[in-house]
Image: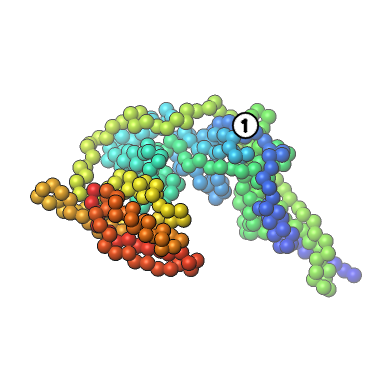
Amino acid sequence: MRTLLLISVCSAALQAFAEDSRTAEPSTKGCPDLTGTYEARIAAWADKVHPFGMRARMETRQFATFQRSSGGFTLIWHTPREEFVAAARSLAQRDSYRYDVWLDRMLRGPLRDPKLPLPPGVADEHDLLGRIASVGPVFRGVDEVLLPKQCKGGWFLVSGPAHRDGPPDFKGGMEGTRDLEYWLGRDKDGSLILKAEEHRTLVLMKESLYTPYLGTRLGSSARLNKWPVSPALDLTPIRAEELPGRSRPARPVPKCLITGDHEAVFFQRLKANLPPGVQIETNSSSIYHGRMRPDGICDPTPYTVTVSAPDAAAIAKVADYLKTDPLIRQIDSQESQVLWDGRLMVKFRMMAAP
């Protein structure tokens, strides 16, 4: 009986392979020691790969430091301290307005008290760094924790397996349907190597029944990048005194404006007093400011906070605390709704003043 040779992907085998990779217990067996500092040389295509695509965009040279953490590694993207400070000085000289905007974001970002919440309107640390990078240099990115989900032969799986279809992801890569993985290892000279491995399954099928009876897994690999090893760099936080001062004084903040600093301290207090299971969902933006009375006292302005809680008793505890917080003058109303999981969502409409 004749047979027809078809090249296709055996979806069941690939799915099982992916599930095995996801459910396998992390192991350090066969893992390389990636600890050290390297000058990162990342091609444009790698911006689509986690964690390379999560790094902050830096105007200066970019380095990657790997530190031992949780059985795996913490990856720190950063730049040499002296190059960062030089870039800040250059920005201050050529564009004073842009520098002042950048400095304000730095003071509310990497130089802020880490115990305080993020500024209002900022989604996460990556969002905050993106806003800083859009106007000036970045010293250090957001740390990425890399767990050893798979190691083999001195290689550390950093991304994948990911299902791909279409044109190659990099020069010399496979076309069509495939599974793609990225691995990190060390060269003999200590440098860091990034390689890709791609796999597809060759399936033989009976021409009459169209049912597979033999599958062969094919694969290829390619070394893509090599990052030279570098001496360790100073990663201590940048201090405000290392940077040039503002070119002009900051605009005075209206006395009755609820600023981001007011909100940050308010949420720090609120989170410390939340009952178990209660989460803050949304809040007003800090654009409201009250009218100042002749006696110098600020009229309160509308302010809202929405929380979710497991039951009415927890909501009552939140209300009791809000009545005592220095920012809140009074609670006007509580708008409640029951969520799909039985939790309560409550919007507190209040009056607040700094």
Where on the picture, by quarter, is residue 35? top right
Residue 48: x, y in percent? 55, 50
Q: Residue at x 69, y 50 (%)?
A: 24
Q: Which of 277/249 is in front?
A: 277
Residue most toward the right?
Answer: 1
Residue 347 lies, in percent from the top left, at 35, 62
- Let me know if residue 130 appears in the view: no
As drawn, is 75 to the left or to the right of 2? Answer: left
Tag 1 secondary structure: loop
For residue 271, side relative to residue 30 (left or right) = left
Instruction: From the top left corner, tell me how far across and down residue 34 is, in percent.
Output: 62, 34
**Which residue, given by chain and number where applicable, does mark 1 sit on?**
191
Q: Is residue 221 left or right of residue 104?
A: right
Q: Residue at x 52, y 47 (%)?
A: 53
Count the marks: how many?
1
Rendered view: 21 above or below 233: below
Name above or below for residue 313 compared with residue 161: below
| Residue 229 in sight from this viewpoint | yes
Q: Nearer the viewer, residue 77 or 2?
A: 77
Against 170, residue 312 (above or below) is below
In this view, the residue farthest toward the left is 294
The percent position of residue 330, horizontal first and vertical second, equals 25, 57
Q: Residues within 10 Å of mark 1 (few under 14, many from 20)?
A: some
Residue type at tag 1: Ser
The residue depicted at 62 percent of the width and 59 percent of the height is 166
Nearer to us in this view, 79 or 239? 239
The reply, left or right, for residue 136 in relation to residue 213 is left
